[in-house]
């Protein structure tokens, strides 16, 4: 699967990239904020976006809404340490495909990717 | 600073933070656990003084406003960064004079995960939500860190403070970190009454 990783933390992007590569997925792009994410998403048309929730500037929730407006079929998995019941529900209502909570296990990422594929 | 037992606040650390640390232990190279949790009353400076400052400390902090005004700080001893890095990422970073940018990124992500575990627990208990701010990093002595946090915390205000000591170890090293959650009294009482 062609994946776009969006996270303001370079270490997290690198860690996720390594895991995806090990799983034979292709990381087609990375973005460290919401505006960059929307631009790269439009340009590269990834099959899946792994999107952080808390970033400087636009939140992941705002970015999710923008991505779904560009492509309602976009598959967007939120990757976040935020595990608040109300926010999780809001993310799903706005079209998130799944939510992966940090810190996540290798198997959890693998399972989410299988479901999305 | 007076101490008073507070079962509800302590249970945040004992249950939810422990679960988070257990997960970190499963995904990282180290073993992470709550060593101690205590509740006290005092100012931010009173709280931070519980950390043993040698020369300086590295701090990651988050502040919530509106829904549940709360400030959380995770303090590290910079001389332990190499051990924490090995336990968290499985490797250490090239050494610099102080905390390097790579170490700062690592500590910030660790703080983001640990501090959000407490926020999640608190807000879910209150049946509320709030998008947390981006975690901030600062390094310095007690005065510098207190001064920086003065931007988001009233330095004269008395808080109910939950202090959690986290033990971090691998087969090669041992370290620890302190987490402080500063509750304004009305919020602490609201939690007690749940």
Image (cartoon, grey):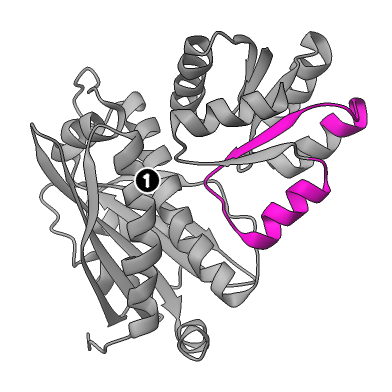
Give the residue at x 68% y 33%. A77
Give the residue at x 59% y 10%. A25
SS at circle 1: helix
A17 sits to left or right of B31: right
| x, y percent for residue B145 | 32, 55
Q: Nearer the viewer, residue B144 or B128?
A: B128
Residue with the mark numbered 1: B23
Q: Is residue A19 above or below residue B35?
A: above
B25 sits to left or right of A90: left
Q: Is residue A58 visible?
A: no
Q: Is residue A72 magenta?
A: yes
Q: Nearer the viewer, residue B187 or B146?
A: B187
Magenta-tinted stretch: A67-95
| x, y percent for residue A90 | 76, 54
Give the residue at x 27% y 81%. B40
Host chain of mark 1:
B
In this rendering, the count of numbered labels is 1
| x, y percent for residue A56 | 62, 39
Q: Quadrant of residue B81?
A: top left
Q: Is residue B100 magenta?
A: no
Q: Residues within 10 Å of mark 1 (few under 14, many from 20)?
A: some
A3 sits to left or right of B152: right
């Amino acid at each position: 699967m062609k994946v776009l990783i969006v996270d303001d933390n370079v270490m997290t992007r690198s860690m996720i990239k390594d895991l995806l590569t090990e799983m034979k997925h292709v990381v087609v792009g990375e973005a460290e904020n919401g505006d960059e994410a929307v631009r790269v998403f439009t340009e590269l048309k990834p099959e899946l976006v792994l999107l952080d929730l808390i970033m400087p500037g636009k939140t992941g929730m705002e970015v999710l809404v923008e991505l779904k407006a560009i492509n309602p079929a976009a598959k967007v998995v939120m990757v976040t340490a935020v595990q608040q019941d109300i926010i999780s529900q809001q993310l799903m209502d706005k079209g998130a495909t799944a939510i992966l909570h940090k810190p996540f296990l290798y198997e959890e990422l693998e399972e989410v990717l299988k479901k999305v594929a | 600073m007076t101490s008073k037992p507070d079962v509800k606040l302590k249970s945040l650390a004992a249950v939810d933070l422990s679960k988070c640390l257990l997960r970190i232990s499963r995904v990282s190279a180290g073993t992470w656990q709550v060593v101690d949790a205590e509740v006290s009353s005092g100012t931010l400076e009173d709280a931070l003084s519980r950390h043993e400052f040698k020369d300086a400390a590295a701090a990651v902090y988050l502040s919530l406003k509106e829904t549940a005004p709360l400030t959380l700080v995770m303090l590290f001893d910079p001389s332990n960064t190499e051990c924490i890095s090995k336990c968290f990422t499985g490797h250490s970073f090239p050494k610099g004079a102080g905390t390097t940018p790579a170490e700062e990124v690592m500590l910030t992500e660790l703080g983001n995960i640990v501090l959000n575990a407490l926020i999640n627990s608190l807000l879910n208990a209150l049946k509320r939500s709030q998008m947390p701010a981006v975690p901030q990093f600062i390094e310095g002595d007690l005065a510098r860190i207190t001064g920086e946090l003065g931007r988001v915390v009233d330095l004269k205000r008395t808080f109910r403070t939950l202090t959690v000591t986290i033990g971090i170890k691998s087969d090669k090293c041992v370290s620890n970190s302190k987490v402080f959650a500063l509750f304004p009294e009305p919020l602490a009482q609201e939690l007690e009454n749940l």
